[in-house]
Amino acid sequence: MSFSSLFFTAGFLPLFLLIYTALPGVRRKNRVLLCFSLLFYLAGGLHYLLLLLLMTALSFGFGYLIEERRGERRWFVIGISLLLLNLAFFKYSAFFLRPLLPLLPFHLPEALLPLGISFYSFRLISYLSDIQSGRLRAQSFESLLLYTADFHIISQGPIVRFREMEAALRERRMSPEDFCEGMFRFCLGLSKKTLLADHAGKLAGQFLPLDFLHAASQGNPPSVLASWLGGIFYMLQIYLDFSAYSDMALGLGRVCGFDYPENFDYPYAAHSVRDFWRRWHISLSSFFRDYVYIPLGGSHVSLPKLCRNLLLVWALTGLWHGASWNFVLWGLYYFFFIMIENLRRRREREELEEERVGTGEEGERKEEEKDRDREEKPEEKAAESSGGKEGRGFPGFRRQSAGERGKRGREIRGRRLLSHLYTLLVVYFGWILFRFSDFHALIAALKLQFGIGASALWDPITALSLWNNLIFFFACLLASTPLFHYIGISMQNGLQQSLSLRRKEERRSERIRDNESFGDDSLQLFDRESEAEAENEHEIALRRIQLRARRRKRALRRAAFFYYLERGAAALLFLALSVMAMVGSSYMPFLYNQF
């Protein structure tokens, strides 16, 4: 079952929400969520559901053993090993046995990958690791099973830690505002998948199909323009597809009262490869950082150990994505660029440190020369200490002119633009490595990017297809930028500012009421005429504040009404367009289901 299927959207989800919202109490809601999660997973096969239950039961038992015998590390090692062996058997056995298949006297069928096994295995590993480190206590089987099988995040993440869900499993509040925002985000993700990602995938397959070598062997290779457009549309597809699922998962979580961590932060707006991986699949990157990279020493180690740590992390990152050598190559590709960026950062830190403290006798000699110059020229020393034209109280400080500031600003913007283009180019070729699992097709696709083996620089059919999809192309580009996110944030900030102003007026009115008793005691010091004037002014001021507070309250209600009306209307529009797209086209599963 997939989030982008009609059965889920029109049947499973409405039934779940109806029962979930009707039942009171967190415990009842947890059991409803658990039952529907098991039904969701059962759609993938009973044997895979039994496997999930077995892995959860093993993690439950080892969790208590690790907690009771924390000094004995063997239980932690055994538990983690069993989880990794289970993952390796289903995901990598065919990969490692493939060279031996011709030697076997029988046919070995290739097992289908259980739904979400990579994600729930890593969640259970993080559960046992947090118990071993003392950050978490062993949980009940029901809570652990709900954490493992939660249908919001079972198939494509994010890889949520148990301690990020622990408080919500015990107590959570589901407000109408959360329901509205959650459904808006779910419908936004659904439309991103059905309206943008699926069509981008079709265009990627049209411009540069996976079997393009067959067409090339018949004398019809793609043009350079077609190969680049195929790579660009695949680059857009994989982001829109995966981030769409994350939007849907986080939206469903908010509807149910859970606050899952963000998994994407507009990675194509990054200015370095390191920045890209801080924005792309954040939960996976943080998992390897916290459970592999930091335990090995992180970046605060010698250069050879840093190289070892990064090599291990990126080899595992590549292998996690799939059982193929192109994924390993993809991980090593990013290791190369991130290692270069780390070395550059180290060198810059060392240079800054040398500039700050000076280096040896040369630094001391320069300081002595500066002191001698100040003693020989007392007027400059006085100008520096008093501020003068240069200092304003800071010795050696010179105010920059508007032209200098503008020039420096242009230099900074130019460097940021170049670093952004460099990052996009690195990521683009990374997705070429990621897409083609066949080695010969991968080499041929890389050659096509530089015109080697291409039919021409461009061809009329490709140019016409691009022209017909130009508006769609720009829509995908806009959906990959934080523009609409910033618009939504500004609307939310305006609503919150109105709410804070209303509360401020209410507090001011309450303070005046609280001061009435003090005023009654102090008015006896004045004559009756002064007392009447003071009371009158007090009443006028209080009425003005109360009137202003009522006006702000009405304005806030109107703003909140129109804000949530707009969100609800947009959600219904996204849902209607998505349903029409699902009815009128063939089903396309999420890309990350295969990982």
Image (cartoon, rainbow, N blue to C red):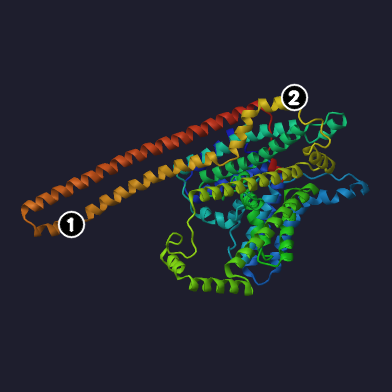
Tag count: 2
**Residue beneath label 1, please?**
517
Determine the image quadrant of residue 110: top right
SS under mark 2: helix
The residue drawn where x is 92% and y is 46% is 102
Q: Position of residue 68 (x, y in %)?
A: 62, 69
* Label placed on residue 67: none
| Residue drawn where x is 69% and y is 45% of the image | 427
Which of the pair 377/17 is nearer the observer?
Answer: 377
Front residue of 584 and 543: 543
* Residue carrying label 2: 460
Amino acid on which disc 1 is placed:
Ser
Q: In this view, does 527 lie above or below 368?
A: above
Q: Quadrant of the N terminus?
A: top right
The answer to whether the residue labelled 1 contacts the one labelled 2, judged by CB atoms less than 8 Å apart, is: no
Graded by Cα atoms within 10 Å as few (under 14), some (14 to 19) or many (20 or more), the crowding at tag 2 reads few
| Res. 128 visible in picture | no
- Which residue is rendered at x = 41% and y = 45% of the image? 496
Compared to residue 440, the image places residue 382 above or below, namely below
Observer-nearest residue: 491 or 254? 491
Secondary element under disc 1, as helix, strand or loop, is helix
Instruction: Tell which tag, 1 or 2, sits nearer the viewer.
Output: 2
